[in-house]
Image (tube, rainbow, N blue to C red):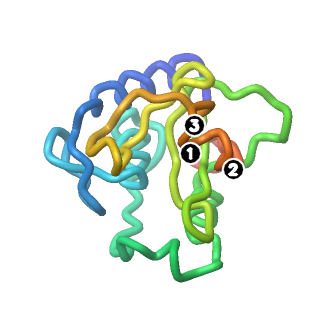
Amino acid sequence: MTPDQQTAVLKEAHRWLNTPYHHAAAVHGAGVDCLMLLCCVFRDAGICPWTDPRPYPYDWMLHRSEERYLMGLDQHATVVPAGSPAEPGDIQTFRFGRTFSHAAIVTDWPQMIHAYLPAGRVILDRADGPDFSSRLGPLYRVTAEVCP
């Protein structure tokens, strides 16, 4: 992404802060989950066209080994090579359950914005905190080549 696009993504992600957590919802101020937050932020920042992965079960990651979350990200972003620094607007994934099933928008590594069920809302958090450091997955970057 260009610096202007990164700024647009971060501005939009910050706008969603404190929106209540609600599974599969996508309504600013009323409810959103981590996946729909990504869809809404990147659409409203003008980076990607609308993508709607719903419906999906609340506990799908507990009963499947297929990496559904990553397969969806692969359609709109590319994996950042291991060891490369995270940039603002990148998407950090995390393993919960059997698969990678959670993601956050990087603001300034290791800070991130995500809809987090235990917090009950969209929050500013740290990827190197106790809830996440052992769950880190691939880092993704949206580019014009994959999301024109």
Where does the image place residue 108, in percent across and percent down from the top left? Answer: 57, 19
64 versus 86 height, above or below: below
The residue lying at 76 percent from left, 26 percent from top is: 85
The residue lying at 65 percent from left, 59 percent from top is: 74
Quarter holding residue 46: top left
- State which tag comes first along the sequence, 2 or 1: 2
Q: Between residue 107 and residue 95, name the one nearer to us.
A: 95
Label 2 packing within 10 angstroms: few (<14), some (14-19), many (20+) = some
Give amino acid for label 1.
Pro
Give the secondary structure at mark 3: loop
Give the secondary structure at mark 1: loop
7 versus 116 height, above or below: above
The residue lying at 22 percent from left, 38 percent from top is: 19
Q: Which residue is mark 3?
A: 130
Give the secondary structure at mark 2: strand
| Disc 2/disc 1 C-alpha distance (Å) | 25 Å
Give amino acid for label 3.
Pro
